């Protein structure tokens, strides 16, 4: 029995389902039951009858799935797969801002730890951040943890005073303007697709700015043939899958998240066999963290 057959067999025995993020390796996306961005997968898990969920992604994604599915067993193939940005805000900075501004809303990007969510007023995704910030009654917004997404929101909602936290995604932050310009010179017909976790100078070169799912949707509907993709290279699997006749180019400075690539077929087999690496959340923290997620669902309607 090969690894794929063994995974299928174990899934059946354990009544399990495999969710994978767009940034995992091609072979992981290929065997997953559902692929998507972290928030889509968290919501999807709620609709599924399976009680064992294997979340193929970084740790905060497992936490998010568990938050929205507290009665299901959520396991992650590699507990050390982490997202540096998810930790890049502090209780101290949040408390300082709350003291400084009476009329403050702490807006937390879903790419964050459960502890940061628990300290926040509302969560947002890269797809709904602008819309939700517009709907908040507060003028003062402390946006955590990502400075680039925070700056993007600030540019779209100039009437609000958006205070930016100094966090960032190391993968999206490394894109350089010269790389994009070189690619544009080489492929002049190519449209530039940019994730809002990239810096402002990269956003200014974009033909489209959006989440991973937004980029996939835009490319799939576009009549254009050539695209420069400024987000993690794992997205190319789904882009090519849905658009086999289109051409995709990546920046020279390879946008690869090594934490996402820690997820392997062998590790999936291991956790399906043992059901180890279960995500266990502190009940009090989880209860507080659910509130900003629920508020996002209300405001995002």
Image: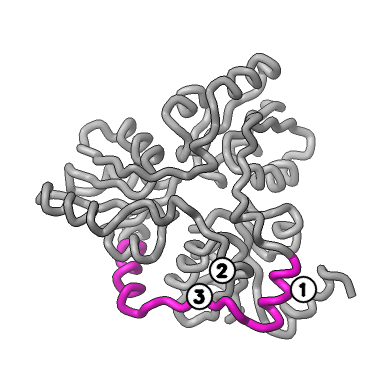
Residue 43 appears in the picture as rendered: no
Are dots 2 and 3 in contact, CB under 8 Å? no
Instruction: Give the CA separation, mark 2 to mark 3.
Output: 9 Å
Numbered circle sitting on residue 215: none
Reply yes or no: does residue 268 show up in magenta: yes
Who is closer to the viewer here, 196 or 216? 196
Q: How many marks?
A: 3
Q: Name the residue under label 3.
A: 279
Residue name at image x 61 percent, y 55 percent: 260
In which quadrant is the N terminus drawn? Answer: bottom right
The coloring applied to the image is one colour
Residue 293 shown left or right of residue 137 in the figure: right
Residue name at image x 40 percent, y 38 percent: 148
Q: What stretch is highlighted in magenta?
A: 265-294
Numbered circle sitting on residue 79: 2
x, y percent for residue 105: 21, 52
Q: Earlier in the sequence, mark 2 or mark 3?
A: 2
Q: Earlier in the sequence, mark 3 or mark 1?
A: 1
């Amino acid at each position: 029995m090969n690894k794929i057959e063994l995974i299928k067999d174990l899934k059946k025995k354990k009544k399990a389902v495999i969710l994978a993020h767009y940034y995992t390796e091609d072979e992981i996306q290929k065997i997953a039951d559902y692929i998507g961005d972290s928030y889509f997968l968290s919501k999807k898990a709620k609709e599924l009858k399976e009680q064992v969920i294997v979340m193929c992604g970084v740790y905060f994604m497992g936490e998010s799935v568990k938050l929205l599915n507290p009665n299901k067993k959520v396991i992650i193939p590699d507990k050390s797969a982490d997202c540096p940005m998810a930790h890049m805000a502090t209780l101290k900075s949040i408390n300082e801002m709350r003291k400084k501004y009476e009329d403050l809303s702490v807006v937390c990007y879903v790419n964050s730890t459960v502890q940061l969510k628990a300290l926040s007023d509302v969560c947002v995704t890269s797809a709904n951040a602008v819309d939700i910030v517009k709907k908040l009654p507060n003028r003062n917004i402390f946006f955590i943890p990502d400075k680039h997404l925070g700056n993007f929101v600030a540019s779209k909602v100039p009437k609000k005073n958006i205070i930016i936290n100094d966090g960032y995604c190391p993968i999206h932050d490394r894109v350089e303007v010269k790389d994009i310009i070189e690619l544009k010179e080489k492929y002049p017909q190519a449209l530039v697709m940019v994730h809002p976790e990239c810096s402002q100078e990269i956003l200014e070169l974009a033909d489209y700015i959006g989440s991973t799912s937004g980029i996939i949707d835009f490319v799939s509907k576009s009549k254009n043939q050539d695209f420069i993709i400024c987000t993690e290279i794992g997205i190319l699997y789904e882009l090519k899958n849905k658009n086999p006749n289109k051409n995709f180019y990546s920046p020279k400075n390879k946008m690869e998240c090594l934490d996402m690539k820690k997820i392997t077929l062998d590790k999936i087999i291991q956790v399906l066999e043992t059901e180890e690496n279960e995500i266990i959340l502190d009940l009090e923290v989880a209860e507080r963290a659910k509130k900003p997620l629920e508020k996002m669902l209300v405001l995002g309607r």
